[in-house]
Amino acid sequence: MSFVEYSDLIRDGDVAIVYLGHESMMHVKVKQGAQTQTRYGVIRHSSDLIGRRYGSKVTCSKGGWVYVLHPTPELWTVTLPHRTQILYTTDIATITMMLELKPGCVVCESGTGSGSLSHAILRSVAPTGHLHTVEFHQQRAEKAAEEFKEHGVDGLVTVRNQDVCKDGFGVSGVADAVFLDIPSPWEAVRHAKAAMKRQGGRVCSFSPCIEQVQRTCEALAEEGFEEISTLEVLLRVHDVRTVYLPLPDFGADLSAQTDDDAAAPTETKPQTPVALKTTTLPREMQGHTGIRL
Amino acid sequence: MADNVDEDAPYRIKEEDYVVLKRGDIFKAVQIVPKKKVIFEKQWFFLDNAVGQLYGSTFDIVPGGTLQPRKPKDAESPADAKEAGTDNRNIQDDGKSQKLTRDDIENFKEQGLTDQQIIQQLVDNSSTFIGKTKYAQDKYIKKKKKKYENIVTILKPSCRILALMYHGREPGKICHLRYDTLAQMLTLANIHAGSKVLVFETCAGLLLGSVMERMGGYGSVIQMYPGGGPVRAGVESFGFPAHFHDTLHEFPVCHVNALLAGTLDTAPPKDASADSTQSDAAGEEEPDPPTTEPTSGPQEVKMETNSAADDVCDPEKEAREKRIEAKAEERKVKQEEKRKKLASAAALLEGRNADGLVIASRFHPCPVLMGMLKFLAPSRPFVVYSQYKEPLIECYTKLKEQGGAVNLRLADTWLRHYQVLPNRTHPVLLMSGGGGFLLSGTTVAADAPKPAGAQRAEGPAPKRLKVA
């Protein structure tokens, strides 16, 4: 199993995603002889997982069932253990397109954080690209490196434990794209430029605060970057449901009576409400993750 | 320095490259053809001088229509150091502040003044310029630059640039698929090198090209197309290397049902002189390899009889007959090619193990989705785009009834651009709802249809009705 290539069957050592229900998933490290507790009962890896096809329905000990899914960066993003605030798929998708990521690209990223974006980058640049990711927190850097190995992508990535604002990305003149998600991105802009290919490339910085965005834009302009654009993407999820709209009772409709009506309709039957399939929105739309430039 | 030139080669503009011209927010996709006039933003020019320059370079369009590379740090804003006012209380907007006339400006142009010089003239001859605030002066100069600068930037095509271009220029051609929505589709469908992706689109090939870009020439893409032939003009604009096209297949949707039923015959046609037998269930098995039929046989006979019949050789008649035969031969070759393509696409599809499905078209998405989902392996993503929400509500409902998909989500994205300038930062544009809607999900192993009382009800139960 690898996060950058599909396989059909679940194997010992895989990381699989267990789907429990709407908006409820968890990741599982598949191991011979191991067990996983869920609210529907126990999943026994040896009999229920190993050798089964990804996408299969698995019945748990209490009788309830789950589905086992092949890991993807998107599923990982919503099931990974958070060590930091992470980027979600909506922002990741926009970043991927704006940085023009594709197979073969060399990308520099800082900070690695919990590896949410990192996995998505690896998926997009495989099999011939590379990711240089920098994380100044030692344990987070180590955990990220561990996970990349477990997920079968360590050949595509180099993790460096250093401060990008002081020491840069550890490479120069090789990157097609650079991504910054750090508190003071303006301090890393010159390092981004140094890491990038001489012939040009794309830079993206993600910040929650407008002041950070302003300072970073200035720094980018000073370093000679062009076509600087700043945008924000918000996701709105629509909840599909059936609603029932009752109909008003205006009394008997006398104008509809014809001469043929022998029995005078003195009562109107209560009309059944109209069932309507529509979507509703959450009361509060997610306001803000960050601004990308 | 020979080394430098070699290193830069992949980043230099070459003849016959497909490029994108850019000025401000306007883009246009063209091909570099020497001595060919190109029109862009009301200007005619030749792209010859761009050859050999690095992608991303900006050029001046000089009178005559040739391009001249523009030095990056050329533009220092005119009237930078001069004084400025504090607000506009004394500025009259009477249209009389500019002393130069249209004719004056035309003269400047003919005299060959650069756009910088013309703008300087306009600034110097504006009675209100000095009274404007610094910000208003910047805005004024920016506006004049937009009008008088004859520049064009030449970019290497990419999904990002082409999506921006189509959305700005011809959104109707791409079903109003906004670029951020396209970005979501590509990521949600986990498009990556080495997978087998099905695409159904009527977006001029933009979606197809974007999928191909993300696959980098690895794996395979099968375009399912309605009608007589696949429409993919937009794919050309991406400028993919030739080998990318080896990964691109096509399959007409009119044969989907036959393929699913196993009755699609993609074997070579029966020929009178051929002794190979075909099975009707050719769709399920490996298509027979095309037998080496003696196609020359019947033709030879025909020619022999012709020449035998006309003892008096009429050269014109013979030539005409030869042409007719040549055309028939051509048609046969084309048909054979078409059959081979159909067979290879069918072979890829019939295993029902595709890795991803993306749909974006003017067709009702529901039947398209329900039909094509059958070709996907379990635990694989699919994404459907629609300009409108209601058809996707239908899809969602059908999928919930039928089963076979989890993580269903109907969503749209709001996009907001910001102007970021010192003391002048504010949102510029909010694009909401106009980008279309996406339904995404993941396939799972098909189940027996759910019993009437679903195990896990979604949403609140309907309120009990009060009887009057």
Image (spheres, coloured by chain):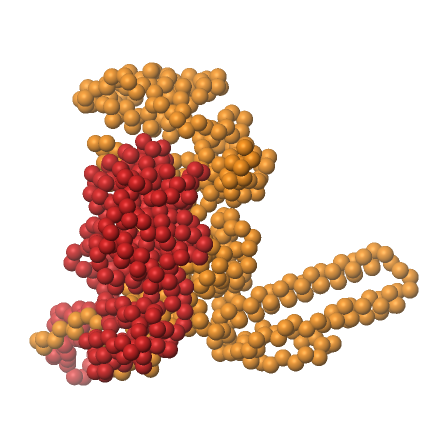
Chain colours: A red, B orange
Q: What is the number of callouts on the image? A: 0
Q: Residue at x 47, y 38 (%)?
A: B55
| Front-most of residues B200 and B185 | B185
Residue B189, x across and y down, in percent: 37, 61
Q: Is residue A231 above or below residue A64?
A: above
Quadrant of the image occupied by residue A18: bottom left
Work out whether residue A22 or residue A283 is closer to the camera in this orientation and state it. Answer: A22
Q: Residue visible at 17% across and 69% down?
A: A245
Identify whether B36 is placed above or below A13.
Answer: above
Residue A33 in the figure: left or right of residue B207:
left
Q: Residue at x 34, y 20 (%)?
A: B78
Q: Residue at left 54%, top 39%?
A: B6
User: Does any portion of residue B20 appear in the rendered image?
Assistant: no
Res B69 seen here? yes
* Direction from residue B402 to residue A140 in the image, left or right: left
Q: Position of residue B238 (x, y in %)?
A: 48, 49
Q: Quadrant of the N terminus of chain B?
A: top right
Q: Position of residue A24 (x, y in %)?
A: 23, 68
* B99, above or below A246, in the image: above
Measured as percent of width and height from the top left, residue A86 is found at 24, 54
